[in-house]
């Protein structure tokens, strides 16, 4: 199976957590699967970079903001790749550009126009784990762009579609989709399965596990989407 695994900011929040992700990827490889990993910036990193930019002006050039923010995910991708290589797994990190993600020209909330998966296929064929920096691409005019809030989920789903992956796993700090917020309501039940449309309804009501745009894209591309916890081995929820 070809599996796309996406890890959010809390899952890669520090070096220890990046090692935890590497261990999880390693386990998936040992089960005989090919893996493409999509990562977010380490938690807090994006806000820190925005604060740096706003030190000079409250309204920095959006193209420069994209250039700045895209570095956060690239740092995580390179660190995870280094950790995997150190464990004896061949891994290659890629920016959105190298992963073939082409977007429109709208800075800070670009839309993905197309994906050329040939570079990823070449690395997978060479027996490598591909680690992609999420949340970013490159415009038709060659400028770095970012996809806006929830952009790494969007990257993962779009890549899973382009690669015709068997499964796209979104790892967060909760172990699936619940009937209501388990942090507020102790009687909340975790669901084993939920339809795309039900998930869209939950997301529109404020469920923060998955962002609307990524669920819509999964439905359009018919991607098998699973949301699970990066801190436990509990089965997640299939969407």
Image (tube, helix red, strand yellow):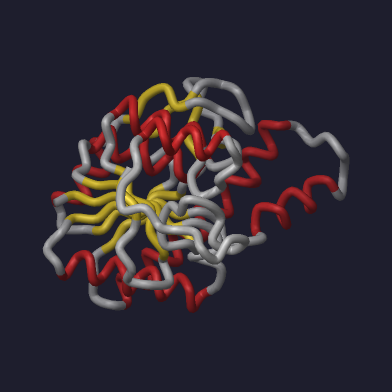
Please name whichever residue, 164 or 132, is drawn nearer the observer in this view of the structure: 164
x 55%, y 72%: residue: 14
Residue 170 or 50: which is nearer the viewer?
170
Position of 232 with respect to 141 (left or right) is left
Image quarter where the C terminus lies is top left
Left or right, 140 with reference to 157: right
Total residue callouts = 0
Direction from residue 220 to residue 11 in the image, left or right: right
- The quarter holding residue 229 reads bottom left
The residue depicted at 42 percent of the width and 62 percent of the height is 175
Q: Is residue 76 above or below residue 16?
A: above
Give coordinates of residue 36: x percent, y percent: 29, 52
Q: Is residue 140 above or below residue 238?
A: above
Query: Which quarter of the picture shows residue 120?
Result: top left
Furthest residue toward front: 187
Give 127 or 18, whichever is nearer the viewer.
18
- For the point 65% across and 46% down, the residue is 68
Picture quadrant of residue 199: top left
- Residue 114's x, y, as percent? 37, 24
* Relative image position of residue 153 (x, y in whole percent): 45, 44
Q: Position of residue 107 (x, y in %)?
A: 63, 28
Identified at 87% across, 45% down, the residue is 56
Task: Please name whichever residue, 56 or 6, is drawn nearer the observer in this view of the structure.
Answer: 6
* Image vertical order of residue 216 relative to residue 232, above or below: above
Q: Along the horizontal axis of the image, is 199 left or right of 1?
A: right
């Amino acid at each position: 199976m070809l599996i796309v695994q996406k890890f959010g900011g809390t899952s890669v929040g520090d070096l220890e957590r990046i090692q935890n992700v590497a261990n999880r990827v390693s386990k998936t490889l040992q089960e005989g699967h090919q893996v493409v990993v999509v990562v977010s910036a380490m938690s807090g990193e994006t806000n820190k970079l925005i604060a740096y930019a706003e030190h000079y002006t409250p309204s920095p050039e959006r193209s420069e903001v994209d250039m700045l923010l895209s570095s956060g995910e690239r740092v995580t991708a390179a660190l995870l790749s280094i950790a995997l290589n150190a464990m004896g797994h061949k891994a290659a990190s890629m920016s959105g550009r190298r992963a073939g993600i082409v977007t429109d020209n709208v800075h800070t909330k670009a839309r993905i126009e197309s994906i050329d998966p040939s570079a990823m296929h070449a690395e997978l064929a060479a027996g490598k784990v591909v680690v992609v920096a999420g949340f970013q691409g490159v415009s038709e005019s060659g400028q770095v762009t970012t996809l806006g809030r929830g952009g790494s989920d969007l990257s993962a789903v779009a890549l899973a579609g382009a690669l015709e992956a068997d499964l796209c796993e979104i790892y967060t700090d909760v172990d699936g989709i619940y009937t209501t917020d388990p942090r507020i309501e102790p009687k909340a039940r975790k669901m084993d399965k939920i339809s795309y449309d039900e998930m869209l309804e939950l997301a529109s009501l404020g469920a923060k596990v998955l962002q609307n745009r990524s669920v819509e894209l999964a439905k359009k591309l018919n991607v098998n989407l699973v949301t699970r916890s990066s801190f436990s081995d509990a089965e997640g929820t299939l969407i």
